[in-house]
Amino acid sequence: MIAVDQLRKIYRVHKRQPGLAAALRSLIHRPTEDVRAVDGISFHINDGERVGFLGPNGAGKTTTLKMLSGLLYPTSGTLEVDGFLPQKRERAFLQRITLVMGQKQQLLWDLPPSETFLLNRALYDVPEKEFRETLAELTKLLELEALVGKPTRQLSLGERMKCELAAALLHRPRVLFLDEPTIGLDVAMQATVRDFVRAYNERFNATVLLTSHDMDDVAALCPRVIVIDHGSLIWDGPLDDLVKKVKPHKQLRLRLARPVDAADLADLGRVVEQSATSVVLQVAQAELQAVVAKVLSSLPLVDLSVEDPPLEDVMRDLFAGAAAGRDAS
């Protein structure tokens, strides 16, 4: 569904010092530098996959999504989406994709979302019967019944985002590019949006490429992740494999009946967190079974759970390793 090969996007940026003299000099000579927003990345995504597209701020994620949706022209390399060249912006291509950006909106501010829905129906030339069926389905999935008639300015951020998703999906796109779709939403609304994206993916076999700094979004939706840093690809594979590679251990979360001394925990693993009756231990995978047995036999245990390390820690260590590699080279 999506094929990217050696994709690059290079910007030529004008630089000058502050002040009047520098401004006058720039009229004659404008020093520039090349900024490699995307630097030779390659990946393929199959029909119906849900893939997380991750990286720190400025890594090139949004630039890549804009090239995949045809908003930006690549400097070099090739890309293809559902058999189309995005930069040509053909009508048939635009009818197969959607780009939802959590920090941008298409809803008309002083009009209710229902007016934007009708406008999008006209833009995409959606047949009346299909429009009504799709709108009814999206309204049910996103619980929009009480929202579509209110002016957009009177809706909360979460309510607007749900309406944004509905507006973006009325033409039933086969490819969803989602850029921070849950930014600024509360916990309940984030869960609603995640459930909806998963339901849409399963209902229409849609391909989803998701960027997010909220690791809960990624863990809930994306079995596979593609990670870029400074425009370069540093990981492409299953999320579980990434966790095992970067953090090859488990976290043992203990709830105790009473406080224990540090000496009682010394040979169980590295203490990550500790309060009066709560302890989190970092334990090597190979030692997990033995440590659990020792905990059960030696500590006043109330509850025990075995967890993977937080994804935030995994990503931080991955980026730190990538930065160390760049420094060394």
Image: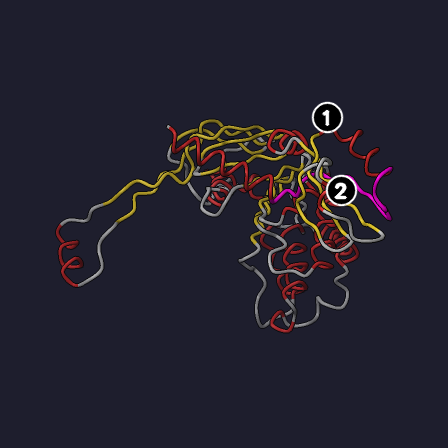
Q: Amino acid at mark 1?
A: Ala
Task: State the extent of the magenta-drawn residues as a range.
Answer: 297-312
Q: Quadrant of residue 190?
A: bottom right
Q: Is residue 226 magenta?
A: no
Q: Is residue 315 visible?
A: yes
Number of residues whose C-alpha sits closer than 10 Å to that of mark 1, classed few (under 14), some (14–19) or many (20 or more): few
Q: Is residue 117 visible?
A: no
Nearer to us in this view, 73 or 160: 160
- Would you say the residues marked 1 and 2 are in contact, meaning their CB atoms lie under 8 Å apart? no
Q: Quadrant of the N terminus?
A: top right
First in residue order: circle 1 vs circle 2: 2
Name above or below for residue 45 compared with residue 147.
Answer: above
Which residue is drawn at the image coordinates 46% and 42% (left, top)? 59
Name above or below for residue 274 compared with residue 111.
Answer: above
Q: Identify the disc placed on residue 6.
A: none
Q: Secondary structure at mark 2?
A: helix
Which residue is drawn at the image coordinates 25% and 50% (left, top)? 15
Disc 1 designates what residue?
Answer: 286
Name above or below for residue 274 compared with residue 318.
Answer: below
Q: Quadrant of the C terminus?
A: top left
Position of 124 compared to 262: left or right?
left
Q: Amino acid at mark 2?
A: Asp
Q: Identify the disc placed on residue 264.
A: 2
Q: Position of residue 106 (x, y in %)?
A: 56, 59
Name above or below for residue 165 compared with residue 68.
Answer: below
Q: Position of residue 132 (x, y in %)?
A: 75, 55
